[in-house]
Amino acid sequence: MIDMFLNGLPVSVEPGTTVLEAARFFGIPIPTLCELEGLSPYGACRLCVVEIGEGPGAKMVSACTYPAQPGLRVRTASARIVRARKMVIELHLATCPQSKVLQDLAAAHGVREVRFKQEYEDCILCGLCVRICKEQMMAGAIGFQNRGGRRVIDTPFNIASDVCRHCGACMYVCPACQLRCTFDQPEKAVCGGCANLEPACLAKPAYDDMMCFMDPCVACETPTSNGRTT
Amino acid sequence: MSAVLARTGLNSIAAFRALQARLLATAKPEQPTVVIPAGTCGQASGASNLIRVVKREILEHGLAEQIRLKITGCHGYCELEPSVLIQPGGTFYPAVRTKDMLAIVHAALRGEVVEALLYKDKTTGKRARRLDEIPFFARQHRTILGRNELVDPIRIYDYLEHGGYTAFCQVLEGGDPAWAISQMKEAGLRGRGGAGFPTGQKWELLAGQPGAEKFLVCNADEGDPGAYMDRAVLEGNPHSILEGMLIGAFATGATHGVIYVRSEYPLAIKHLVIALRQAKELGLLGADILGTGMAFDLTLVRGAGAFVCGEETALIRSIEGKVGEPRQRPPFPIERGILGKPTAVNNVETWANVPVIFERGAAEYAKIGTERSRGTKIFSLVGKIRNTGLVEVPMGMTVHDIVYGIGGGSAGKAPLKAVQTGGPSGGCIPAAMFDLSVDYDSLAKAGSIMGSGGMIVMDDETCMVDVARYFTAFLGDESCGKCFTCRKGIQRMHELLDAFCQGRATHADLSLLEELAAVVKDTTMCGLGQTASNPVLSTLRYFRDEYEAHIAGRCPGRVCKDLVTFSINLKCKGCLLCLDACPADAICGEKGVVHVINPDLCTKCGSCRGVCKLSAVDVTSP
């Protein structure tokens, strides 16, 4: 067992545990976005940052990827962390203001304004879809492309993937996607196969920019118009 | 294959020593030699033509017995390339034109000096014959770069003749890895890649790791804008890196080595491939090195052009054939590196220092530099400086001595304002702090870093906000994009800096920029992200007044196009030069009449200023 401190509380955890798992086990909340049980930790969203160490040498690391270590002193809600976390949420919200998940996070953490130029992107590149496709669906149909500001998620060579089974897991886990189930608003639903007799179709130009990898659409079996062919 | 080569190579340390003795006995140091540095920089400035002239002269007149031509790597004085060095005697001819080359060859044959082509001091007008009489070289301490003058990088025998691989043989003969590590610790060498981790300690950690397979890596993915120290060493003396890694392998028990070079260095790759082949053929690499049973193989991996692959965890992933994305440490590469095996990553310059330490002795080496930063460091001195080039100085020299003593001060008329050290991850040191000693700790205290050794000199005509914007744009392109705060944070910082440069920024933007820079520094995972806000933070620290001037709509450096106006003063004689040069037809006037710039049409490209011989074009900011 590894002995460490969580917000001053001495705790013991199993070797191989991450700081996030340890904190969860002892009931200390840490907000997350790109983390999901059953998927390998990735550390992309930086929302789960915690402070480790003491004094001027204290540094911030992502709780989801940092392994528990003997004698580690972790603080999950110091002023420095709260400040950083608010900025991280603000940056996220400036990228994807339409995401319900991000709006809820902002509300919960008291982020009331976005001081950056508003963008309307559909993706925060958290990599949940990439990981669920590879690790749980055993498909690996999608992955990251390019780097820096040009980084996107897509299928290899941007053509319809042979290994995609149209399971929709990528849409299900996406925190920013508007394509997820919107059962209570069937008229807005893209899939809505469960509620709509005549589902809205991805082939509509309105959905061109959305990062949907369901091709053809599960509901209507029509190839989409965004450059993909079946 | 390797067994066949081993049989043709040397099979004992005695055989190696015999070969070296034979080489030394047949060497003719008194024979006139024309040394032409032809690294990438030398070739670009015309060294290839000089080489052709000398070769033809030797072949046509059958001078092969009387004079030798030696092509080496870069000697460091970029400003005066292509240069020629005549040995023995060390006569140095700077900025040699092709038509003067024959005169130099014939003078060398006669043992004479062409006085008119020697280096001439710009201020005193005095000529200097030898390198050590030139101020640029006189104040340097060239333990690493100095060997570039002696060694032909593609001939291993040349390296052996100049004492190459002797240090490795000594270590091998001693037979005690622990002694080698203790020597490294005594020498106090710290990693030259930027972080300054003690190399001896790193080796000790690697030696202490369990497992039969261990890796050593030479990080030659040098990507900082304006920095090319590693390239000079790779091109000019690849065997010194091989020797350093061999010593490291013996000390740590590493079995495999990887040299990770960026593809943008084709000449370095070529020289390394040749060096690796020669070392293998000679039995210095492979399964049974010099018959001692030591096994170490060395491979070359080419980078694919990502700056972030200079970060060690990204570099390791790239070597494994994966996407170059850093990962969380711990576990550190020293525990789990390439393919999960213990791995130690060191920079090119660090490896090049290793043979020097064992040749001179650790105690002797430790005398150079300061208490906590030992040895010499190569800097690439670029920007608005008179003597551009690579300079190697002992640690602890002041910025002032480097910039004015060696660099010769400002290249133009404007006084110097700051020096940017450490590349995009580094920071700026203002002129008021030029008495700062250049070592790891002082630089860190001043808010900059040693980095790999880039030193960009800036004068009053440089806009610090624009500098921060440039580096932020560079890092935004080169971020791997994994951490949200690095990818988006840098993009947002760049947006804010853009607003400053365009005069749209407010005081609220300034505090937002400060807040954001601190969060980006705190919340990202790897070295690239954690230092990405350094250019912003350090310029904010020392040049806050410039940011405030931009808010007020003024650019003190007169660089930001949206905040400056071009006008023509009364020095104008009406020569029509600028009129012809203006791409926007914004200048009107006729011959003999003072010209006028139409501010509505002017695109502020600066063409008029470039062609004006009378400095009649003014750039003003309100």
Image: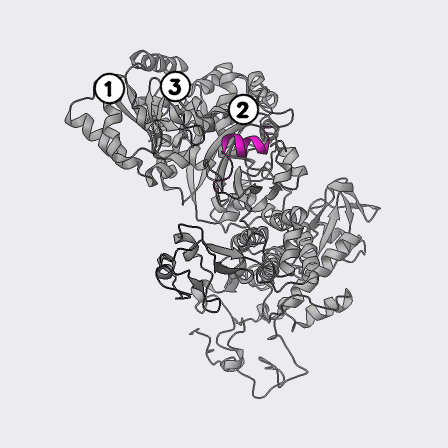
Residue under mark 3: which chain is it in? Answer: B
Local crowd size for mark 1, using a 10 Å CA cut-off: few (<14), some (14–19), many (≥20): some
Q: Position of residue B294 (x, y in %)?
A: 46, 23
Q: Chain of mark 2?
A: B
Measured in 3D between alpha carbons, the distance from the residue under mark 1 to the one under mark 3, in whole angstroms, is 24 Å
Mark 3 crowdedness (10 Å alpha carbons): few <14, some 14-19, many ≥20: some
Specify the farthest residue to the bottom: A197
Q: Mark 2 to mark 3: distance in Å?
A: 24 Å
Q: What's drawn in magenta, residue-wise?
A: B397-412
On the image, numbered disc 2 is attached to which residue? Answer: B251
* Depicted B386 relative to depicted B588: above or below: above
The image quadrant that residue B11 belongs to is: top left
Vertical placement of residue B75 versus B326, above or below: above
Q: In the rendered view, would you say A170 is above or below B120?
A: below
Frontmost residue, B496 versus A177: B496
- The reply to whether residue B492 is visible in this rendering is yes
Residue identified by numbered label 1: B109
- Closer to the chain start, of discs 2 and 3, is 3
User: Image quadrant for the N terminus of chain A?
Assistant: top right
Dot 2 amino acid type: Ala
Label 2 sits on a secondary structure element that is helix
Name the amino acid, label 3: His
A84 on left or right of B547: right
Task: Please report whichever mark, 1 or 3, sits nearer to the chain's N-terminal start.
Answer: 1
The label number, if any, that marks residue B162 in the structure image: 3
